[in-house]
Amino acid sequence: MAQSGPTNIVKYRKFRGINIGIFVFLFILIELIVAISGYVNNKHISPYEVRKGSLYTNSLYTGIAVRNEEIVTATDSGYVNYYVREGQHIAVGDLVYTVDETGRLSDTAADTTEENHMTDADLARIRTDISGFSSTFKEDYFSEVYSFKNAINSKAVELSNYDVLSSISDISDINSSLVHYKYSSAYGVISYMYDGYEDKTLDTITAADFDQSEYTYTQLAANELVSNGDTVYKLCTNEDWMIVIQTDPETAALLMEMEYVEVRFTRNQYTSWASVSEHIDAEGNYFIGLSFTNSMITFAEDRFINIELLLDNSSGLKIPNSAIATKDFYIVPKEFITIGSSGKQGVMRETTDDEGNKTVEFIETSIYSETETDYYLDNIELRNGDLIYKPDSDETYIIRLTDSLQGVYNINKGYAEFKEVKILYSNDDYSIVKPNTVYGLNEYDYIVLDSTTVLDGETLYE
């Protein structure tokens, strides 16, 4: 079938409706861009809640025992025999030793020791000592076996010597006039070892004294020949004694701040409190003296003593080191601080108006710390060279002296407020600061985690 003629077909464009999804997507994208831009450009303040804590910084040291020690020398020549065992208390007038010019008493003492003339009570004392040593012995301190051996030998010699002494009148070939009896002239704890450290004090100890590889001592023994002037024994005359340790400046500052520290003796795990003193020598070495009023007799035979400082028992407020900042303050004598009509503290400062007239105005200031004589005042309202007046007086003071304080930025009130901190101890990440100080922090305060992210007085939130 043929077509009658050409036809014009016109296609009309279909109407597309508005796609609401595109607008929503664009709106969200714009909001996201604005939020990211605002986050990037704005400061990021991270708060930190202050809580109590500790750094668990127990420290092991080998210290030097410092005691009141008197060297006693012989006044006669001959063979010495002892009648008091190592580490025993003696009183004034107690028989300590004899000097036998003939040597026969020494031979008799040796024979008596071999025969083991000991009573059941004597043997019980020795068994008790051995049992006590065994219960506390540790392989890490094997050298103590030798000290214990000397103590047991000393006790055995003491007992046998008493046997000989009691029967000296029955020994026909010994002239008793040639045996010299030596009695103690002072009260104390006896020792038969001397090492040249007897006159050492906290102020005279040096770093070289801690080198045990160079340490030497002399152990005195019974039945030895002595001459007039030779050392025969040593007497520790005071229960008060000290252990000196060498440490770093930071630990020394911590211990001096604590004033008292708990010490554990590693040999027997006994603990005791010690008062702290300090000495810094000409070479800048720090020495800490730990003073005790007990336990001297337990360690009377030891010069080097292993101890542990229980520093973790001293806790405080734990803060990150990143929160600590340093700020400068003006130092103003306390007598120049007054109270204004508002009841706030401040100073009376001299000012000059545009016409050159001088007047005195009250300037409110904040106090951030104090000493016995001065206050630390903020440097925001005051200026270097300001002239201030003493209340009810014509006396003036020119503000010039400054000093810096360590502190953190407290944000409890919505703005960064500097608070002084007194650091007790620090490690690489945290510091322990003294709690509840007048111008410092309290537990549960909020501070800025990173002190470099804020300015003093900056408002953080309304």
Image (cartoon, helix red, strand yellow):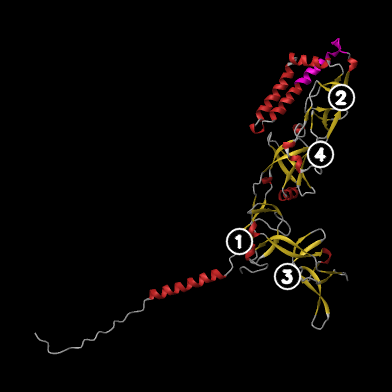
What residue is disc 3 on? 380
Q: Secondary structure at mark 1?
A: strand
Residue 103, compared with residue 283, is above or below; it is above
* Mark 2 vs mark 3, CA separation in Å: 79 Å
What residue is disc 2 on? 227
Dominant secondary structure, magenta: helix
What residue is disc 4 on? 200
Task: Give the x, y percent position of residue 277.
Answer: 78, 46
Mark 2–mark 4 CB contact (< 8 Å): no
Q: Amino acid at mark 4?
A: Lys
Q: Amino acid at mark 2?
A: Ser
Quadrant of residue 319 within the rendered picture: bottom right
Q: Of callouts 2 and 1, which one flags the residue occurring earlier in the amino acid sequence?
A: 1
Quadrant of the frame with the C terminus: bottom right
Q: Which of the numbered marks, if any, corresponds to residue 47?
A: 1
Q: Secondary structure at mark 3?
A: loop
Q: Of callouts 2 and 4, which one flags the residue occurring earlier in the amino acid sequence?
A: 4
- Foreground: disc 1 or disc 4: 4
Q: Of callouts 1 and 4, which one flags the residue occurring earlier in the amino acid sequence?
A: 1
Quadrant of residue 148 within the rendered picture: top right
* Start-end of magenta stretch: 156-174
Considering depth in this image, is 60 or 462 the residue closer to the camera? 60
Residue drawn at x 64%, y 31% as measured from the top left = 139
Q: Of callouts 1 and 3, which one flags the residue occurring earlier in the amino acid sequence?
A: 1
Q: Amino acid at mark 3?
A: Ile
Q: Of callouts 2 and 3, which one flags the residue occurring earlier in the amino acid sequence?
A: 2
Quadrant of the frame with the N terminus: bottom left
